[in-house]
Amino acid sequence: MPLLDIRNLSVDFATASGQFRAVDGVDVNVDTGDILAIVGESGSGKSVSMLAMMGLLPWTATITADVMSFGGQDLRGLTPRQRRKIIGKDMAMIFQEPMSSLNPCFTAGFQIKEALRLHLGLDAKERHAKAIELFEMVGIPAPEDRLKAFPHQLSGGMNQRVMIAMAIACSPKLLIADEPTTALDVTIQAQILDLLTGLQRETGMALILITHDMGVVAETAERVQVQYAGQKVEEQPVGDLFETPHHPYTAALLAALPERATSRKLPTIPGVVPGQFDRPMGCLFSPRCQFADDRCRNTPPAPCGPELGLARCHYPLNAKAEATA
Amino acid sequence: MFRYLLSRLLTFLPTFFGVTIISFAFIRMLPGDPIIVMAGERGVSEERYAELIQQFGFDQPIWRQYLDYLGGVVQGDLGQSFVTKKPVWDEFFALFPATLELSICAMIFAVALGLPAGVIAAVNRGKLFDRTLMSTALVGYSMPIFWWALLLIIVFSGMLGITPVSGRISLLYYFDNPSGFMLWDALVSDQKGAFWSALHHLILPTIVLGTIPLAVIARQTRSAMLEVLSEDYIRTARAKGLAPGRVNGVHALRNALIPVITVIGLSVGTLLAGAILTETIFSWPGIGKWMVDSIFRRDYPVVQGGLLLIAVMVMIVNLTVDVLYGLINPKIRKR
């Protein structure tokens, strides 16, 4: 049984102008020790689906799923009290903006020890020792001093390390990293990714990496799930995805990578992700897809089989190559 | 920290001199001659009038009078009342504890109710409690103090008979009042019931004086909390699995306190202004009533001195607020 099993997850937000579907029938499967990357543009529902699972969405969100289980426990219909026993302990999350994700009024030590007291019930001395151990694990120099520092006294990279230390404080089975490097300098980005994959190897936890950076995906992930406009459009092991993308959107994303550019001008995907009012009738990617025809524009495609990366497309790419291989 | 305090104290100097000039000038702009007012209906002869003019120094040019006054102030001498002949300083400190006692009670009332009400309203944004509270706060803020006071007196003293109409303590009790704080002195006077009587007398004035600060604090707390609740670090706190009480009461409130402390500090000024009305209505022997009486008597030294001392109080409160900012939010401490 997978550690995390989500099937047909949808999230709707009640807005002033009606319902808005941010996540539309997404499946997520993660086993212990997996590294899954969820990739997509802004607004593709990557973060929202994970926040929905953590129960961190505002009350305007309506969450439905056929299956949503974590470690064998059904997450649907949990009371808030039951859910709080799981999140922060077995399932932890780090966020995009390290500088604003830590409370400016409290020291780094206070914020990490808070989690240790809540979930592990350690006394003050044990908490202090454990906090220092965690800071050392995430590579924070002079941990004793850093515990007393306020977030504004630390750099962005250092704050993200504090966030990671906080997230792994209770040895979670699953760590969700929501664009953990987007707000950081390029040099720091690599360090943080190394840290995350290193910790993953050491502890054997599962890691879900939400990102829009294909470079990050190539370096870290084992399996990739591509999301577009709230739907999962493709899922493949990382090597195969880069090698033989099946969904035109994936192919377009890869073609837009500077490393893969063949012409002087970098290829782009024309248009933007559809919003609340311009949702296409058929395939959601059809208005931007260079292969789209009338069938694409009128009939929403169903996901193909696993041999085609579950691509949600009428005309998956590289189908022949797959067949002959 | 010490250097910071020192630099803040230096900025007080211009304000201090400004207040002396304004209070000196404004009371003299009021029509009416203090000597004529003192003489009352009997009037005063021309020779006596000239004599008194000279005695009070009103024959001197105005700048000369101001410099004489300022000279006294700098040496800690605020002059003496035209009417009672007692030093302004002594009168002020005899009456100030009554005002302070009432103001402290009003502030406790406003903060103790306003802060939690604002937090609960913010957490339940848009729900019935929120809407009821916010419209009630608007009414409280807009209500004229004297009308509200009279209404409360009619209902609680007149119709229900459960609170006294005026004064600080029942006439049944008599004891020394060394500290000037009636609650405290009654408590240590070992007369049974004295403390309760003093407390009883405080109820209505406290509610009346505390209503506007209560409304302001509740609204400010709500809006500050709403802003903070959408911050990333609140999501982090919730992602840790912390209970809502701790997320709202510790992680959010601490950050929301900065603007709330600001309005609490500003309310102190309002409180002293409100004390003038409240004290007059409830015959509360404090500085508010004292100032009003002195203005009617054209008692220049009392008005000048009283205004100056109140201004200094407000400045001290503002300084305290600035220091508190740093204690609450370490990011501000750095500057």
Image: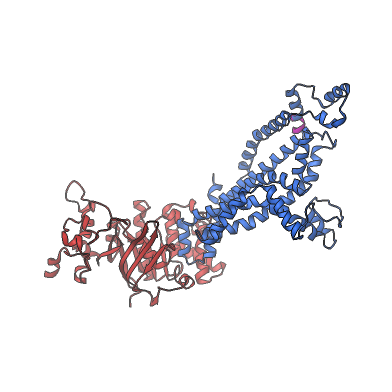
Q: Position of residue B304 (x, y in %)?
A: 74, 34
**What is the quadrant of residue A242 in the picture?**
bottom left
Asked whether A291 falls inside the magenta stretch, the response is: no
Q: Taken as a whole, is the magenta stretch helix, strand or loop? A: helix
**Is B303 left, or right, of A131 in this rendering?**
right
Disc count in the image?
Answer: 0
Residue A167 versus residue B225 in the image, above or below: below
Q: Nearer the viewer, residue A67 or A71?
A: A67
Q: Position of residue B219 (x, y in %)?
A: 56, 52
Q: Is residue A253 visible?
A: yes
- The chain painted red is A
Residue B301 at x, y percent in the picture: 78, 33
Q: Nearer the viewer, residue B293 or A204?
A: B293
Q: Residue B33, percent across and down?
A: 79, 28
Direction from residue B287 to residue A208 in the image, left or right: left
Query: Which quadrant of the figure contains the N terminus of chain A?
Result: bottom left
Residue at 48% x, 62% y is B237
Taking A43 as reference, is A138 left or right? right
Q: Which residues are magenta?
A: B70-74
Residue at image location 69% in from the left, 46% down from the top: B274
The chain coloured blue in the image:
B
In the rendered image, the quadrant that contains the C terminus of chain A is bottom left
What residue is at 22 percent from the left and 51 percent from the top? A268
Measuring 85% from the left and 32% from the top, which residue is drawn there?
Answer: B40
Residue B73, magenta (yes or no): yes
Q: Nearer the viewer, residue A19 or B103?
A: A19
Q: Quadrant of residue B298?
A: top right
